[in-house]
Amino acid sequence: MDTKELLKKVRKIEIKTRRLSDHIFGGEYHSTFKGRGMTFSEVRQYQFGDDVRNIDWNVTARYNEPYIKVFEEERELTMMLMVDVSGSQFFGTQQQFKKEVITEIAATLAFSATQNNDKIGLILFTDQIELFIPPKKGRSHVLRIIRELLEYEPKSKKTDITEALKFLSNVMKKKAIVFILSDFITDDYQQTLKIVGGKHDVTGIRVYDRREEEIPNLGMVQMEDEETGELMLVNTGSKKTRINYSKYYQERVAYFRDSFTRSGAGSLSSRVDESYVKKLLGYFKRRG
């Protein structure tokens, strides 16, 4: 992609996703994630109507009259976008690849965080860490993130969510809001996710295509595994083949839901031909 073409694409995504984050997500994002981190600020004398749960009993005992602790919201948060750029993200039978939808969702979230003056960082991963952009503030930083999401050429096609989560733990010492964007057609990440979910505010966003849910009956078809590049002849006319594939796929989806629930993390799924706007808004409202 030449520079002119790339800038055009970045601009197009900025216009679309910025409008969404300005009009829809700014307030929802704010009410969902702000107020989670409260820091102790000072004590003052109790006034009628104050929350009695905030009474500082030590100071109250010392001065023989009630004092309460005053907290202030930690204004600045850090959002980390963890984006799966493995081979399977280039699958798509509708108008868009999964990768394109994931890029739009990531950009929308990033602009929502920018409105709150939060820092945004990016981790692109396959079965290795492909790219890490440390968290920073500002529009030009978000545009750099969008540029990488559009243009980055991964070295590997495979997926390893556990590796990505371990890397996140190593680089993010303070609590962050973490969005993991992937199709989650993999497993063996539950244990690491539990550890990360105990420290960070984690949400898994599963983006998938309708055709991944079941194979249509098309007779003998040559298929390519997007992650290994392996070509194989598959008899889609066989009912057993179709049932086995569907079972494998549903097991991955169940593992995704179960893993995020057990880790105390949030999750949502959005099909490429559905409105991710509605899905995100519904999720924010449920959590807010």
Image (cartoon, rainbow, N blue to C red):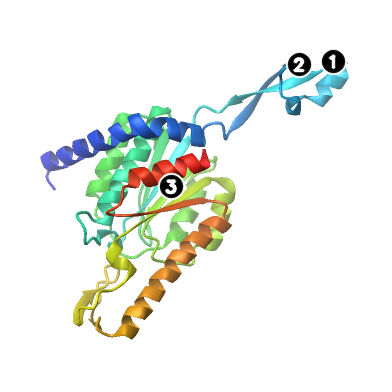
Secondary structure found at label 1: loop
- Residue for badge 1: 65
* Frontmost residue, 216 versus 223: 216
Mark found first going from the N terminus, 1 or 3: 1
Which amino acid is tagged 2?
Tyr
Bin the neighbour count of mark 3 within 10 Å (Cα to Cα): few under 14, some 14-19, many 20 and up.
many
Q: Is residue 144 left or right of residue 168?
A: left
Residue tagged 2 = 46
Label 3 element class: strand
Q: Picture coordinates of residue 196 (x, y %)?
A: 54, 52
Q: Position of residue 137 (x, y in %)?
A: 38, 30
Whether residue 156 can be seen here:
no
CA distance for labels 2 and 3: 40 Å
Label 2 with label 1: CB-CB less than 8 Å: yes
Q: Please determine whether, in this image, residue 1 is positioned above or below residue 258.
A: above
The numbered disc on residue 179 is 3
Q: Nearer the viewer, residue 109 or 149?
A: 109
Q: Position of residue 145 (x, y in %)?
A: 31, 41
Give the SS element for disc 2: loop
Give the vertical position of 87 relative to 287 (above or below): below
Q: Is residue 71 left or right of residue 128?
A: right
Give percent across and percent down for residue 268: 43, 52
Answer yes or no: is residue 129 visible.
yes
- Residue at 43% across, 47% down: 179
Q: At 28% across and 56% down in the image, what residue appears?
A: 98
At x 27% / y 54%, what residue is drawn?
273
Give the CA distance from mark 2 to mark 1: 8 Å
Dot 1 amino acid type: Glu
Q: Which quadrant of the figure has residue 117?
A: top left
Q: Is residue 46 left or right of residue 88?
A: right
